[in-house]
Image (cartoon, rainbow, N blue to C red):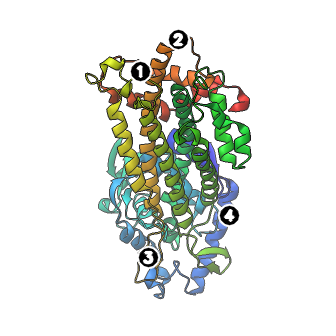
Amino acid sequence: MIQINGSSLTIEEIKLLAVENEPVSLSQNAKKTVQRSRRWVDEIISQGKPIYGINTGFGIFADRQISSHESRQLSRNLILSHAVGTGVPLPKEVVRAAMLIRANTLAKGFSGVRSSLIETMLEMLNRGVHPIIPSQGSLGSSGDLAPLSHLGLVLSTDEDDLDEQSGYAEFQGTIMSGKKAMKKAGIPRIILEAKEGIALTNGATFSAAIAALACNDIENLLSVAEIALAMTLEALLGISSAFDPRIHKSRQHPGQITVAENIRALTKDSTLLDSTNRIQDAYSLRCSPQVHGPAREILAFAADVISREINAATDNPLLFGEGEAISGGNFHGEPIGLVMDYLGIAMTEISGISERRIFRLLDNRLNENLPSMLVDRHEDAGLNSGMMMPQYTAASLVLENRSLSTPDSIHSLPTSAAQEDHNANSLTAARHTRQILTNTTHVLAIELYTAARALDLRLRDLPQAKLGRGTLAAFQSIRKSVIYHPTDTLWGPEIDAVRKLIETREISSAVAGSLPKSTQ
C-alpha cells in the first residue's frame, strides 16, 4: 500500500501504482494538513478580499472579482471551459501516474482543497476508473490545464449533473461517460468548491507523469544498451583495452566509468575479445563508454529533478496561513520540459550508436570476415538478404528520433492576451521523449537480434571460443525465444519477441543473475 503525504512519493512508487496497480491511501497527518489549508480558504472567502483563483477570474480575467455565492460555478466553469484537449488518448499508465502525482501535490496542504477531492482521486485509482485524457493541447503552463480539466470532468459535477458534461472514462475494460463509470464503480462525484477548480488543474502533472515513467524505462534501456554493445563487441572480435579502468578514471566522468566497468563484467572470460591483430576499434565500439556514460548521468540528474517535482506544490495561489495566499508560478513546466529534452537527446544518441554497430555487423568489410548481411554462408548472399532490412528499420527510427529530439522547451507562444507570455511546452517534450524511448527500444532489439545471429556464425567458425559471462546469458535468453534460421524468414515477429524480452526485463534479469552481485 502506497501512502501519500505530499513529500515522500518516489518514482518507483509511481511505477508500482501506474503499471502494477498497487493500492494507495492518504496519510492521516496529510489529511489534517489539507483540512487546515481548507480552513484558510474559507477565512479568505469570508473576508471578501480579492485573491486570485479563489474569488477572481483566471488569466487575463484576474482583475474580475467573483462573488462568494458564485465560487462553485467559478470552479466548474474552469473545468468545462478548459477541457479542450485533442489527439489520441494518453495510455492508462500515464493517466494513473498523473492522478497519483496530482493527489500527492494537493496533499502537501498548500492548495486549499478539501480532503474529499484527494480521496475521490485515490478511490478512482484503487477501483480502476481511468479518465480518457487527450494527449495534445497542453503548453505546460499554467501547467497541463487541458488534460487536468478532462480529469476534472470525470471526478466532479454540478447541480445539473449532465452526462454529456462528465467526460469519458474507462472502467472494467469499457469506455463510457465519466458519470456512468463513477456510478458503476460506486464513487460519488463531488461538487467543486472555491479554489478547487484551479488547484486541480494548475501544474505540469501529466508532463511529470510521463517523465517519472520514462525514468524507469530509461534505466532498463541503458542496461540493455550495454548488453547489446557487449554482444556486438564480442561478435566483432573487439579490443578490450578501450575499457581499461585507468582510461576512464583519468577522465573522471562517473557515467563513463560505470559503463566501462559494466562492459568488463559482461565480457569477463570471453575468448573472442583481443583475438585479432587490430590495434583499435571503430568509435561505435571504442568510444561507447563516452557515449553511453553521459546518458546515465543525465538520467540521474533528470530523476532528481522529477523526484522534486512529484513532491512539489504546483498550483496558484499557494496558501501559507490565515489570509495569506500568495500568487506565483510554480505551475510552470520548464523544469520538466528541459529534463525531458535532455533525456530525449541522450536516448537519441543511444539509438544512433546502436544503429552504427548494427551496420558494422552487416558489412563484411567491417565485421571481421562474417558473411555480408549475416547470411548463413558467403555463397548464400544474393539469394538471401539476411539482416539487410532490419538495419533499414533501425536507421529509419534513428532518423525519426533525431527529429523528435529537437528541443521542445525552447519553443513558446503567448496565451491569454499575453498575460501568459512564456510557456514551457513541457507535455510536448515529454510525449516526444516517450516516442524516442519506444523507437530506441526497437533499435536495441534489432541490435540484440543481429548480434545474436553474428555470434552464432562466429561460434560456428570458432567452436572452441567462449562467450563472456553476461553476453552468454543474454545470448541464451534470446535463443530461448527465437531460434537461428539459416535462410531468410519473417524477421519482424522475431525482433518483436526480442523487444518483448527488453520490455519485460527478462534479458536484464537473466544477465544480472549471471554476474557477481558486486558488479550489478
- Rounded to the nearest angstrom, the CA distance separating label 2 from label 4 is 69 Å
Disc on the earlier residue, 2 or 1: 2
Residue 22 seen: no
Instruction: Please state the horizontal and vertical placement of residue 340, each as a whole percent of the image.
Output: 52, 57
Q: Tell which tag, 1 or 3, sits nearer the viewer.
A: 1
Residue tagged 3: 74
Disc on the earlier residue, 1 or 3: 3
Q: Residue at x 63, y 31 (%)?
A: 240
Note whether 209 is above or below 78 in the view shown. Answer: above
Displayed quadrant of residue 155: bottom left
- Rounded to the nearest angstrom, the CA distance separating label 1 from label 3 is 59 Å
Q: Where the C terminus falls, by quadrant?
A: top right
Displayed quadrant of residue 164: bottom left
Residue tagged 1: 482
Frontmost residue, 265 versus 271: 271
Determine the residue located farthest toward the left in the rendered image.
383
Frontmost residue, 6 versus 514: 514
Q: Amino acid at mark 2?
A: Pro
Q: Is residue 130 left or right of residue 214?
A: left
- Rounded to the nearest angstrom, the CA distance separating label 3 from label 2 is 76 Å
- Contact between marks 4 and 3 (CB within 8 A): the answer is no
- Rounded to the nearest angstrom, the CA distance separating label 2 from label 1 is 21 Å
Label 2 SS: loop
- Contact between marks 2 and 1 (CB within 8 A): the answer is no
Q: Where the N terminus falls, by quadrant?
A: top right
Disc on the earlier residue, 4 or 1: 4
Q: Amino acid at mark 4?
A: Thr
Disc on the earlier residue, 2 or 4: 4
Residue 332 seen: yes
Residue tagged 4: 33
Label ID, residue 463 = 2
